[in-house]
Image (spheres, rainbow, N blue to C red):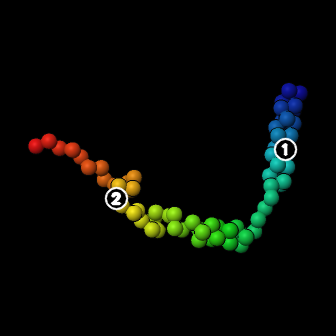
Amino acid sequence: MDVMSSSLQQQRVVVEQLRREAAIDRQTISESCAKMMKYITEHEQEDYLLTGFTSQKVNPFREKSSCTVL
């Protein structure tokens, strides 16, 4: 009997998860792509991969200069 109630409880958990997933608002791929392209176009000036850095000091990925004493 214990195994049966455990299985029943697991099935209830699965059903609840499926209900939550079914309630999620869905969008078509074309809508999602259009929104993504709009976002990218609006923010492309802030994208350092496209525009580059204004100076090397601003670049967090620049090679660190090492201090050497001769």
- Residue 6 at x, y = what percent? 83, 32
Front in this rendered view, residue 29 or 36: 36
Q: Is residue 58 left or right of residue 19?
A: left
The residue positioned 31% from the left and 53% from the top of the image is 63
- Quick one: SS at disc 2? loop
Residue type, numbered disc 1: Glu
Please name the residue shown 82% across and 40% down the image: 13
Image quarter hosting the C terminus: top left
Residue 68 screen position, x and y as percent: 17, 44
Q: Amino acid at mark 2?
A: Gln
Does dot 1 land on a helix, a strand or a loop? Answer: helix
Q: Is residue 11 visible?
A: no
Relative to 58, is 1 above or below?
A: above
Q: Pick the quarter of the image with the N terminus.
A: top right
- In the image, is 21 to the left or to the right of 56? right
Disc number placed over residue 56 in the picture, else none: 2
Residue visible at 54% across and 68% down in the picture: 44
Q: Is residue 61 left or right of residue 12?
A: left
Q: Toward which corner of the image does residue 2 lie, by quadrant?
A: top right
Separation of disc 1 and disc 2 at Cα? Answer: 53 Å
Which mark identifies residue 58? none
Q: Is residue 31 left or right of residue 53?
A: right
The answer to whether mark 1 and mark 2 are in CB contact below 8 A is no
Find disc 1 in the rendering and name its residue. Answer: 16
Could you classify mark 2 by the number of other residues whose Cα lies within 10 Å: few (under 14), some (14-19), or many (20 or more)?
few
Residue 33 in the image, given as x and y percentages of width and height: 67, 70
Q: Earlier in the sequence, mark 1 or mark 2?
A: 1
Graded by Cα atoms within 10 Å as few (under 14), some (14 to 19) or many (20 or more), the crowding at tag 1 reads few
Using the image, determine if residue 7 lies above or below residue 56. above
Q: Closer to the camera, 29 or 4? A: 29
Q: Nearer the viewer, residue 9 or 70?
A: 70
Task: Name the spot of residue 19 as percent of width and height, x first.
Answer: 85, 49
